Amino acid sequence: MSTQPEETLAVLADRLGREQVFGEPVERESATLVPVLRIRSGRGRGGVTARAAGAFAIGRDGKVAWHPAVDVNRIVWGGQLALVAIAVAVATATGKRRKTR
């Protein structure tokens, strides 16, 4: 039993809620790709942000696979934050050693 991509998309939209926005489906070879954005509103402060969350791939057989988006900026930021934390820990440890001598 094969389902149409539109039917599958409607089911996914009902399950995911209002915080996701689906892009225009794109058909490629043997699958339909549906981009998904995650929306955040500033509530009382105003403003709205949207980030790529990933894409659903709907195969001809109706099977759905999720492909999350990779946020390279967030990965780099996390690495920089870890390096700063290590540098502060090393500086603190070496500073204490100097004072005790």
Image (cartoon, rainbow, N blue to C red):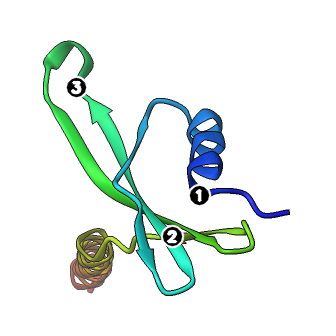
Query: How far, Cα to Cα, is label 2 from label 1?
Result: 7 Å
Report which quarter residue 101 is drawn in.
Answer: bottom left
Q: Earlier in the sequence, mark 1 or mark 3?
A: 1
* In the image: residue 95, left or right of residue 62: left
x, y percentage for residue 61?
A: 74, 73
Residue at 27% in and 81% down: 83
The disc label shown at residue 97, or none: none
x, y percentage for residue 82?
A: 33, 76
Of 93 and 49, the residue lying toward us? 49
Q: Earlier in the sequence, mark 2 or mark 3?
A: 2
Q: What is the three-letter code of the residue carrying label 2?
A: Thr
Q: Nearer the viewer, mark 1 or mark 3?
A: 1
The disc label shown at residue 5, or none: 1
* In the image: residue 98, left or right of residue 58: left
Look at mark 3 in the image and give the residue it sits on. 42
Q: Earlier in the sequence, mark 2 or mark 1?
A: 1
- Mark 1 neighbour density, 10 Å: few (under 14) some (14–19) many (20 or more): many
Q: Secondary structure at mark 2?
A: strand
x, y percentage for residue 2?
A: 77, 63
Q: Nearer the viewer, mark 2 or mark 3?
A: 2
Q: What is the three-letter code of the residue carrying label 3?
A: Gly
